[in-house]
Amino acid sequence: MGRRGGKGVSDEDYVVNKRSGRNGKGKRGKGREEIETSDIEDDLSSYVSNLSYQQNIDKESLGEGSLTGESGIEDNDVLDQQLDVSLEAAALKNSVVRVKNLKIIQELLSSKIMGETLFKRKGEMLDVLIKSFKIGKGSEKLTTSQLAVLYCLQCGEEIDMESLYTELKTFLLCDINDGSADVGQRAKIIFKLAVLCFLCSDNIDDRKELLVLLREKVKQNDPDVIINSLAAISLILTVCTPTERKNVIHMLLPSARSLLKNGNVEVRIEAGEFIAHVFELGRDYDELFDEQVEDLEELLEDLDKLQTDGAKFRAKRDRKVQRASFREIYALVSGEGDVHEQVKISLNETLTLTSWSERVQYGAIKEILGTSTSLHLQQNIFVREIFGLGAVPLRIEPVSRGDKLEMKKLNAACHKARQKSMLRQRDKRMVV
């Protein structure tokens, strides 16, 4: 699996390989702030339009997310300007402007490999994250948590990730336990916190603290909270020691089994996937794990019913998705199947997932990066290290837009000449 721990190791052998302006209340101060905000917004509108144009050029001529080639220097200059303006505006008091620019930075970090451009601004980036967590409300905190994870994925071990996690963890825990906040947003922040722990922390106490919190969240009634909590626990278990895994598995397996009868199809599927992952991890540290599971035959019967469920009171799509998911879950729990999934990274490279733990890690990274996952698997050194892909391969320069246009003109000219030749041949046959 690369650097993120292995399968079937003892605690002793387990090693993680990681790594001032005036603020008066008078009219004058207020006017200066409005002028500053207006200027920033004007600059941003031009840069946003420049960003959209640049992304279209990248997709058509350089490939998704590429920043290399003949225009590489110009592209880096544009990124520098975009990031500088957005970081400055994201620190303003105006919440609308702040959220707008947080989303611009989020899009940049997701769709581009920033590298040194972002590393040179790590101080400003950290200040923006902390300020947004402190004074932000509602969706701004969710955007900030997503931005924090993207920041870690971009910079990797170039920054002090342990300290970063310790500093941001307090804010995220506060948001998760805020009863006045939207439940759906809190559920998503739960998962973001788990991804941060997975990426940044090698501390057993950090994992233990988070797992205790997540066990309590699994017992709640909201489907989003349950789904994100189970997914978060699965992710953290992939980097735990065998002893940690054993304790968590024995405590959570009964809860997961009870969720198989939940009325929400997504909760049932997430619980089933968690159980499949638990059986894989359990067999890693104990070959006789199956014999220690209480009522194993009853569990297999429940899974079998779910993989053949044809109840008409369920939606047709729900039945189809459930049966497809539980066929794989049942095969793994019963010991009759295994995981073998291939993810196409580029024309010459493929990521092969051979365990449920690898699938869980890939799913978490994909959840954060979205459509830019392939780009980061190709060019982001830190992401490649997570999956053991090695150094970034040399990239073959794609055909530029200008060359494509010339080829199109040449093909059109050849087609026109061929048509004329065919017409002349047809006229000669008619005369004869």
Image: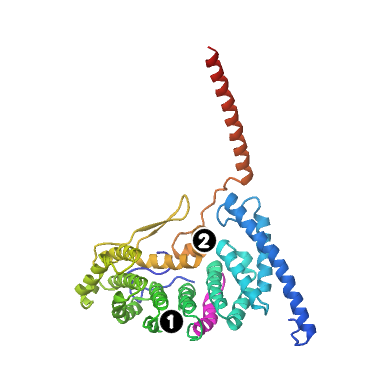
> On the rendered structure, is 27 left or right of 294?
right
Q: Which secondary structure lies at badge 2?
A: helix
Distance (Cα) linking label 2 and label 1 = 28 Å
354 in the magenta segment:
no
Report the disc number at residue 25: none
Task: Name the amino acid, label 2.
Answer: Ser
* Residue found farthest to the top: 432
Query: What percent of the width, then of the height, locates residue 310?
Result: 26, 65
Q: Which secondary structure lies at badge 1?
A: helix
Q: Residue at position x 73%, y 72% from top? A: 38
Secondary structure that dominates the magenta span: helix
Q: Quadrant of residue 328?
A: bottom left
> On the rendered structure, is 190 left or right of 11?
right
Q: Residue at position x 61%, y 72% from top? A: 102
Query: What percent of the width, then of the height, locates residue 276?
Result: 30, 69
Q: Which residue is mark 2?
A: 372
174 in the magenta segment:
yes
Query: What percent of the width, then of the height, locates residue 362?
Result: 43, 65
Q: Which residue is mark 1?
A: 210
Magenta range: 158-175
Eyeballing the image, is 391 above or below 83?
above
N-terminal-most mark, 2 or 1 = 1
Task: Name the amino acid, label 1.
Answer: Leu
Query: What percent of the width, then of the height, locates residue 27?
Result: 79, 85
Eyeballing the image, is 153 above or below 253?
above
Eyeballing the image, is 189 above or below 416?
below
Q: Nearer the viewer, mark 2 or mark 1?
A: 2
In the image, 43 versus 293, the foreground residue is: 43
